[in-house]
Image (cartoon, rainbow, N blue to C red):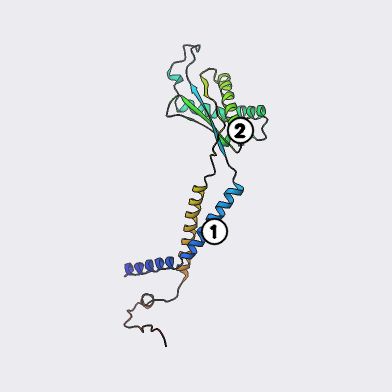
Amino acid sequence: MNNELQEISFKKLIRSILQMWWLILIFVIVGCSTTFIMTNLYIPETYLASTTLFIGKDTDIASSISMSDLQIDSKLVLDYRELLRTKLVTREVIDELGLNMNYLTMVDRLDVETLSESRFVTVTYIDTNPDRAAQIANKLSETLVIRAQDIVGVDNIQIVDYADIPRYKEGPNMFINLVLAGIVAVLTALIIIFIIHKLDNRLRTKEDIEKLIGLSVLSEIPKFKGR
């Protein structure tokens, strides 16, 4: 009996969704339109610039430092990443370039990662201005090379490729934003339809009557067209 009631309730829910398709359509149109307008008007375009560095062994380093100590592993990469994110490095870049930003903003926009577990490291920076993105990425790498030698005491990092001015924007991605907006709109509309379905206590079919009184319907008056 419970399975039959659940099946009836599920059928009613599906019927409600099909009958209120217009509500889903309205939510999708409003959600996608709002996302399109907000993305164009309020979300600035961003550009990504990256430099490539190589971490290796200097021939003048004391022999007490073994090759294993200079292997680019996750710990060493983390050391350089954290050094690049320090106030010492970021504020020096901000001061030299005369930028109007704090070091926290710069830290949020930069990243350091290895290339396929090799000893090559990329320093990437995202900015709304492509020229400034390349300029900051290059200056960060140059400052990292100098400060790594001063703090670590080992001259084992060098710049391989400087950042070029990016020609294509990194974001925002209009297609992904619209897809996400459409998904959220559909889910929101379905939740509203489900709530309406749960709050609707009207008797519409003989199954509703049987469910209410617990008795089977013996007969029903058919609906005739006309007078």
> Relative to 1, is 45 on the left or the right?
right
Q: Which residue is mark 1?
A: 30
Amino acid type, callout 2: Asp
Image quadrant in which the C terminus is located: bottom left
Q: Alpha-carbon neighbours of circle 2 within 10 Å: few (<14), some, or many (≥20)?
A: some
Please identify the quarter of the rendering in which residue 206 is found: bottom left
Do residues under tags 1 and 2 come within 8 Å of each other at their CB atoms?
no
Q: Alpha-carbon neighbours of circle 1 within 10 Å: few (<14), some, or many (≥20)?
A: some
Q: Which residue is mark 2?
A: 131
> Relative to 103, is 200 on the left or the right?
left
* Label 2: which secondary element: helix
* Label 1: which secondary element: helix
Where residue 205 appears, as percent x and y from the top left, is 38, 76
Amino acid type, callout 1: Val
Please identify the quarter of the rendering in which residue 88 is found: top right
Image quadrant in which the N terminus is located: bottom left
Which badge, 1 or 2, is on the more N-terminal residue? 1
Where residue 181 appears, as percent x and y from the top left, is 51, 53
Where residue 25 appears, as percent x and y from the top left, is 49, 61
Q: Residue at x 49, y 48 (%)?
A: 175
Distance between the alpha carbons at the discs numbered 1 and 2:
36 Å
Q: Residue at x 42, y 66 (%)?
A: 18
Q: Is residue 129 above or below residue 156?
A: below
